[in-house]
Image (tube, grey):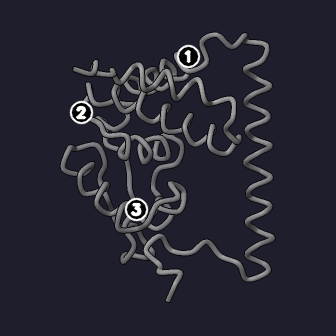
């Protein structure tokens, strides 16, 4: 009878092959790992990773419209709408209309929403520390700066591509039509 291979062994095999991977794939895997690490911690507080994305934005700038929030989160408006409904039901945010445009609702944190910042931000710090363990502090800032350069390069590429009429296709678009 063959021996059952554990998930840990599978992960070890995957790690062993990382040396052959391109930077883009490694960054994607790291982002997924960061998200999962933080999501586990947030779940203990009844918050999903998706909700975390919006809370981070609102802690920096509340009073934004749903459209602005979805743009800042780089997520679709329907996704943002669903998240806001859940956050509202949890008493974490409230939406209000303000003069002069009474048609647009703006999103504000409640006291609970602000209180969650003190509770949840340390979880993100902890997830970062776990991920960066083994990397000397002197190299962490270099890594951070290099990642910012990568982001700036990709943004510049996107701007130039859009100027040439090249846009990112919708995820549900059929490219063979």
* Left or right, 129 with reference to 165: left
Residue at x 44% of width, y 45% of height: 53
The answer to whether the residues at label 2 and label 3 have Cβ atoms under 8 Å apart is no
Instruction: Looking at the image, tell me whether mark 1 or mark 2 is earlier in sequence order.
Output: 2
Residue at numbered disc 3: 106
Q: For residue 136, what is the image quadrant?
A: top right
Question: Marks 2 and 3, how far apart in space?
Answer: 24 Å
x and y percentages locating residue 39 in the rendered image: 36, 33
Residue at x 80% of width, y 25% of height: 142
Q: Which mark is residue 162?
A: none
Above or below for 177 versus 20: below
* Left or right, 149 with reference to 177: right
x and y percentages locating residue 155 in the rendered image: 74, 58
Residue at numbered disc 1: 129
Marks 1, 2: nearer the viewer: 1
Residue at x 28% of width, y 43% of height: 92
Above or below for 149 versus 160: above
The answer to whether the residues at label 1 and label 2 have Cβ atoms under 8 Å apart is no
Element on which disc 3 rests: strand
x and y percentages locating residue 34 in the rendered image: 50, 31
Q: For residue 20, what is the image quadrant?
A: top right
Q: Nearer the viewer, residue 11 or 111?
A: 11
Q: Nearer the viewer, residue 75 or 107?
A: 75
Q: Nearer the viewer, residue 64 or 76?
A: 76
Residue at numbered disc 2: 46
Q: Nearer the viewer, residue 133 or 95?
A: 133
* Left or right, 21 with reference to 126: right
Instruction: Looking at the image, tell me whether mark 2 or mark 3 is earlier in sequence order.
Output: 2
Taking the view exactly as shown, the residue that stands out farthest to the front is 1
Rate crowding at label 3 as few (under 14), some (14 to 19) or many (20 or more) other CA atoms within 10 Å. Answer: some
Taking the view exactly as shown, the residue that stands out farthest to the bottom is 177
């Amino acid at each position: 009878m063959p021996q059952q291979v554990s998930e840990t062994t599978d992960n070890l095999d995957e790690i062993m092959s990382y040396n052959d991977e391109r930077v883009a794939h490694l960054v994607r895997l790291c982002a997924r790992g960061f998200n999962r690490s933080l999501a586990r911690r947030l779940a203990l507080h009844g918050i999903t990773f998706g909700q975390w994305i919006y809370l981070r934005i609102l802690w920096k700038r509340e009073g934004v419209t749903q459209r602005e929030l979805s743009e800042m989160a780089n997520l679709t408006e329907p996704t943002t709408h669903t998240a806001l409904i859940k956050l509202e039901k949890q008493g974490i945010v409230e939406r209000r209309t303000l003069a002069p445009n009474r048609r647009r609702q703006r999103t504000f944190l409640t006291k609970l929403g602000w209180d969650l910042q003190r509770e949840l931000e340390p979880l993100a710090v902890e997830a970062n520390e776990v991920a960066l363990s083994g990397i000397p502090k002197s190299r962490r800032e270099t890594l951070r700066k290099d990642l910012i350069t990568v982001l700036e390069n990709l943004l510049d590429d996107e701007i130039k591509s859009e100027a040439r009429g090249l846009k990112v296709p919708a995820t549900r678009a059929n490219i063979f039509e």
